[in-house]
Each structure stands twice: as structure tokens, then as C-alpha cells.
Amino acid sequence: MVPRPKAWDNREYWRESLKDLYGAYNQVCAYSAQWIPWIEGSPTVDHFIPKSVKPELAYEWNNFRLSCLKMNARKRDFQDVLDPFQVEPGWFTLDFPSLLIKVNPDIDEPIKSQVRSTIKRLKLNDDDDCVKHRQDWLMQYCKGRITFEFLKETAPFIAYELERQNLVESIAFIMSVT
């Protein structure tokens, strides 16, 4: 067992893995499912199981998740957020045109409760910036400024939901962009 340091200052060796983590995640936040620009996006290493809970996992690659600073700060040491590695397709849905993330009504409890908790904890719908960021990506696609392939790389959840809902071709009309 690894002893828990009194403070993590000067022991934050996981930061050394950030560039590798950034590459492994294709520069996409595990929680917002959107591209994190290296400079202004502030990519961070999130410890999915918090260091305060299991300090022995503080340096374990399989406990690291790439996260933008905002999502990491919201998740903190809480353990009511679903592990992105465990999320199955269709648990979260994206409502068009509101761009609010919703719980799929067809999934079973307790998964519904966990999805709701994740949405709430990370403030995925309560923060106008989060919704606006989704809108910015979608509008870039609707206006033809980015390709669908680029949208898949930079905002994979939005692209996935457009495909799942068969809206790839009609979303510009739905969003009133003509």
C-alpha cells in the first residue's frame, strides 16, 4: 500500500503524463466529449477514483481521464459521476434544437439515476457556456464551415447523436440555418 502524503505538492507526477493522455484521448475531454485546445482549454489529468479515496491509484494510468479544467473542477472528489469508460452508447442523448443532454428514457434504473447524477454534477445543462459550446460546434457544421468528419473528431457526442437520430442531413433546417 502506498502511504498517503500529507500534501500532494511536489508529488504531482501524473502531470508528466498529460501530453500522452492528451494524445491518447485524441484531445477530447472524457466528460464533455469536446475538443480541448491545448493552450486555452486547459487540459488536465482527472483521477477518476479520487486521490483522497484511493491514494494508491494516484499514479496509475488506468485511473487517469483527460478532462478540461472546468469538468475536473466540478467532479473534484465526488464519486457520483459515471466513468466515461463504462458509459454505453445511448445512455445520454442530445435534444435538438435545445442541445440539452438528457437521460435516455429506455434505459434501466439504476443507470438512469447515474446518468442524471453525472449531468447534474458536471452541470452539463446548467452552465450556459457548456450549452453554448455545443451550439458553436453544431452551428459551424450547419453553416458548412466544418465537415461532419471534423465534427466527429472535435465533438464526437454531437456527431454520434446526429447519426443516431438520423439528423446529419436535416440538422441545418432544424436549427434554422439555411
Image (cartoon, rainbow, N blue to C red):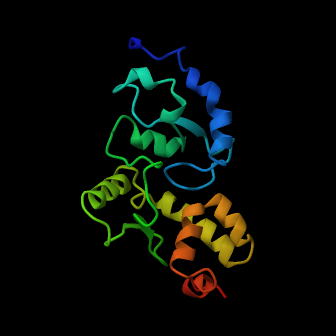
Q: Position of residue 145 (x, y in %)?
A: 75, 72
Q: Quadrant of the N terminus?
A: top left
User: How many numbered circles are shown?
Assistant: 0
The reply, left or right, for residue 168 in relation to residue 62 is right
State the image quarter where residue 154 is shown: bottom right
Camera sees residue 100: no
- The front one of 3 and 32 is 3
Q: Is residue 28 visible?
A: yes
Query: In the rendered view, would you say 170 is above or below 109?
Result: below
Q: Is residue 75 above or below residue 2?
A: below
Identity of the residue drawn at 37% across and 25% down: 54
Foreground of the two, 101 or 89: 89
Q: Position of residue 169 (x, y in %)?
A: 64, 84
Q: Position of residue 155 (x, y in %)?
A: 61, 61
Image location (x, y in percent) of residue 7:
43, 14
Where, quadrant-wise, is the C terminus in this rendering?
Answer: bottom right
Q: State whether residue 113 is above or below residue 7.
A: below
Q: Is residue 135 left or right of residue 22?
A: left
Query: Which image quadrant for residue 162?
Result: bottom right
Tell me which residue sits at (66%, 78%) in the image. 142
Q: Residue at x 53, y 15 (%)?
A: 11
Q: Nearer the viewer, residue 127 or 161?
A: 161
